[in-house]
């Protein structure tokens, strides 16, 4: 039996095969969290919200269930744009 005693800074680093993949997962997760906040504040049906966001209700359901594998960064940015959200990006140097 092999024991692995690796420590990760967060769950995305543990799930991803590469640092680039982890960074992509982190970005998608953050965008999905914002869309979920919008959905909770909307107080409307998923069907009406999906139409407002330019996606289908099943697609919104996937998003609400956290199906991160179903959404690219491009798709999430498009959904946020349809919601009227301005995306701002910050850059920070990694600490080694």
Image (spheres, rainbow, N blue to C red):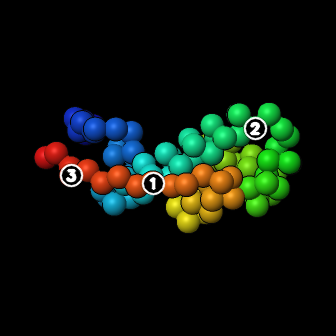
Residue at the spot of label 1: 88
Q: How far apart are marks 3 and 1 (CA)?
A: 17 Å
Q: Nearer the viewer, residue 68 or 75?
A: 75
- Which residue is at 75% across, 38% downward? 42
Q: Distance between the residues labelled 2 and 3?
A: 36 Å
3 or 1: mark nearer the eye: 1
Residue at the spot of label 3: 93
The answer to whether residue 34 is left or right of residue 6 is: right
Across and down, in percent, residue 9 comes to: 28, 38
The answer to whether residue 60 is left or right of residue 77 is: right
Q: Is residue 67 above or below residue 41?
A: below
Which quadrant of the rendered structure holds the N terminus?
Answer: top left
Q: Which of 88 and 27 is in front in this view?
A: 88
The answer to whether residue 18 is left or right of residue 47 is: left
- Which residue is at 56% across, 66% downward? 74
As helix, strand or loop, the secondary structure at mark 3 comes to loop
Query: Which labelled disc corresponds to residue 42?
Result: 2
Sooner in the amino-acid sequence: mark 2 or mark 3: 2
Quick one: label 3, few (<14), some, or many (20+) residues within 10 Å? few
């Amino acid at each position: 039996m092999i024991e692995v005693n690796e420590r990760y800074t967060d769950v995305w680093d543990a799930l991803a095969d590469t640092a680039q993949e982890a960074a992509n997962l982190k970005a998608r997760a953050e965008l999905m969290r914002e869309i979920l906040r919008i959905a909770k504040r909307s107080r409307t049906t998923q069907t009406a919200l999906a139409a407002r966001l330019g996606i289908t209700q099943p697609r919104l359901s996937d998003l609400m269930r956290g199906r991160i594998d179903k959404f690219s960064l491009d798709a999430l940015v498009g959904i946020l744009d349809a919601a009227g959200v301005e995306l701002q990006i910050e850059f920070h140097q990694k600490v080694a």
